[in-house]
Amino acid sequence: MAPRRTWIVLALAAAVAVGCGSTPAPAAPPEPAAHARAAAPQDSSVLAFADAQLAATADTLAPPAYPVRTNPDGTWLTKEADDWTAGFLPAALWRVYERTQDPVWRERAERWQEPLTAETTHDDTDLGFKMFMTFAVDHQLTGDEGAKQTALAAADTLASRFNPAVGMIRVWDDRDDQEKYQVNIDAMMNLELLYWAAQNGRPQYADIANRHADRTMRDLVRPDGSTSMFGGYDQRTGALQRTYTMQGFRDDSTWARGQAWAAYGFAMAYRYTQNPAYLDTAHRTADWFLGHLPPDRVPYWDFDVPQAPPEPRDTSAAAITASALLAMNELDADPELKDADVDGARGMLASLSTPAYLARDTPFRSILLHGTQNLPDGQADSGIMSATTTSSRP
């Protein structure tokens, strides 16, 4: 069996970038445990491949042309720094620097991070994704005071999106919109910026993060552990008006990457708060995810579509949930739970490491094949940089 730390590194690497190849849908692999044992000796080579793909992306593109998803020929489609995905490449580069302490990776991360400095006041975007995983992590790893102040400024903007009547931070809507008040399950991943800020001079932000997590747990996590993507609220009374989707199959379906964000986000919230309800919710959402996987342990883009080709997979959701389970392993006290966490992650990571899903020996610039960013918008089976889920301990 590979050491647990190796699997954690692989999970973080695998979640960096997901791509599309011309490979056919894979046949069902052996049972997960046997598959994991077979894949374990290849861990170092998979990690080296992930690093090489990241280095090639960082060194062949130039900021502010941020990779978002792959084109049909495997190259990256790029957008500018105002896109919500712009933080994911520098975030991944910081994580390689954390692991290697190689100054080349720090230089790459700083170079790709720098154009995001002006994003601190861009409020109708996912500032936690964009600014925690870059500037806050920069400060954690290097002690850079300028990076800390940039991250705190972003936290101030994020906190300004909080409505006390709703008890949640709105997403996407213009701050002056008097009608809509939309909150998605993805926003759990923005809370780390507030929890971190609460430890770095903004203690009041912990209450905002906790209130948001509490209501997400109540409104967007269903009793069986599955999730709704969006809640729509009356911003005057705070009442939940409806739940719905924008990237899933239908309003009452379970979008695979949203389910992954929930498992990871609640595990992160527990790490900062030690609130057992958050860890329980992380387990319930992860267990539901694992219990609805196809035989090869990689989900289709939504759990309520026919679980067979030609429906596309979403390898990003598997990588994110594997990261969540390994985070839970570090948080759980019960040895049986800890073992179950690793076993669940290992089954997915073993499949992601196979030629059916790994982009090695293909023309694609990503690490993994067969991710689905937003199928309703026609973005299916292509590289998605937004699959990154790196985080750090407080």
Image: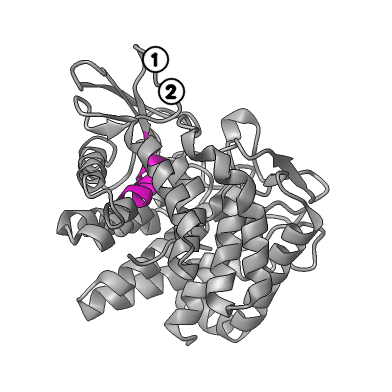
Q: Is residue 66 above or below residue 169?
A: below
Q: Residue at (54%, 39%) from the top-left corner?
A: 119
Q: Residue furthest top?
A: 178
Residue at x-position 43% and y-position 55% = 148
* Number of numbered labels in the structure image: 2
Residue type at numbered disc 1: Asp
Task: Pinpoint residue 259: horizontal percent, then vertical percent.
Answer: 39, 47
In front of the other: 121 or 164: 121
The spot of residue 6 in percent (x, y) is 50, 80
Tell me the SS state at disc 2: loop
What label does residue 173 carry, if any? 2
**Magenta highlight range:** 184-194
Q: Main secondary structure of the magenta part?
A: helix
Give the residue at mark 1.
Answer: 177
Front one among 280 and 56: 56
Query: Relative to 137, is 164 on the left or the right?
Result: left
The residue shown at (20%, 22%) is 238
- Disc 2 crowd rating (10 Å Cα; few below 14, some 14-19, many 20+) is some
Q: Nearer the viewer, residue 8 or 308?
A: 8
Category of crowding for the residue at label 1, using alpha-carbon neighbours closer than 10 angstroms: few (below 14), some (14–19), many (at least 20) = few
Q: Is residue 193 magenta?
A: yes
Determine if residue 201 is in view: yes
Residue 313 seen in render: no
Which quadrant of the figure contains the C terminus?
Answer: bottom left
What's the distance in space between the residues labelled 1 and 2, CA to CA?
7 Å
| Residue 130, position as x, y percentages in the image | 51, 46
